[in-house]
Image (tube, helix red, strand yellow):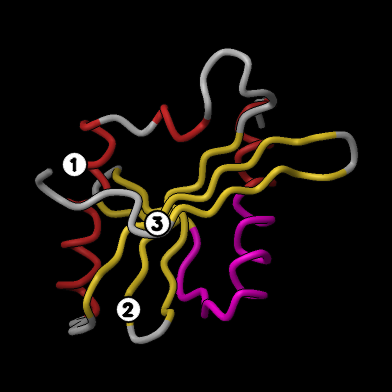
Amino acid sequence: MARHNELGRTGEAIAADYLEKKGFEILERNWVNKRKELDLIAMHNDYLVIIEVKTRTTDGWEHPKEAITKTKINAIVDATEAYIYQTNTLNEVRFDVVTLIPKGDDWIIEHIEEAFHPGL
C-alpha cells in the first residue's frame, strides 16, 4: 500500500475512534458506490452524518480541509444519495469534515460539523 494510502487509513481509524468517543455510532467505513466513496457514515443525535476525513502530514502546503473541492462535494452528495436509497434511510443528513495532522506521537484533530451543504 502506498504511504499516502496508509496515512489516510490511519487517519480514518483515528477519526472513527475520536467520533465514537463523542457519541457517534459509526455505521460504515469506506462505503463505496460506483467508484465514489464515503469515508465514514455515522448516526449522531438522530442525524445521518457523512464524514469526510482528510489526513495530511503537514498543513504547510494546504490545510487538509482546503482539499475538499466542489467536485469532491458533488461526489460525496451523489454517494450519499445512493446510500440513502439503498438503506431506505429517513433521517436528516449532515455533512461533517474531520481533519488530522500528526504532531509527534499525537494528532491535531479538527471536527467541523455542517462543513458544507449540498448545492451551495
Q: Earlier in the sequence, mark 1 or mark 3?
A: 1
60 or 28: nearer the viewer:
60
Expressed as whole percent of the image width and height from the top left, the position of residue 53 reads 50, 47
Residue type, mark 2 in image: Tyr
36 or 24: nearer the viewer:
24
Left or right: 37 as drawn, with respect to 57: left
Q: Residue at x 30, y 43 (%)?
A: 35
Q: Residue at x 61, y 23 (%)?
A: 59
Mark 2 lies on residue: 47
Residue type, mark 1 in image: Asn
Q: Quadrant of residue 72?
A: top left
Q: Residue at x 29, y 65 (%)?
A: 94
Residue 77 magenta-highlighted: no
Expressed as whole percent of the image width and height from the top left, the position of residue 63 reads 53, 27
Residue 20 magenta-highlighted: yes
Q: Earlier in the sequence, mark 1 or mark 2?
A: 2
Q: Which residues are magenta?
A: 12-29
Q: Nearer the viewer, mark 1 or mark 2?
A: 2
Q: Residue furthest top?
A: 61
Mark 3 lies on residue: 96
Left or right: 80 as drawn, with respect to 85: right
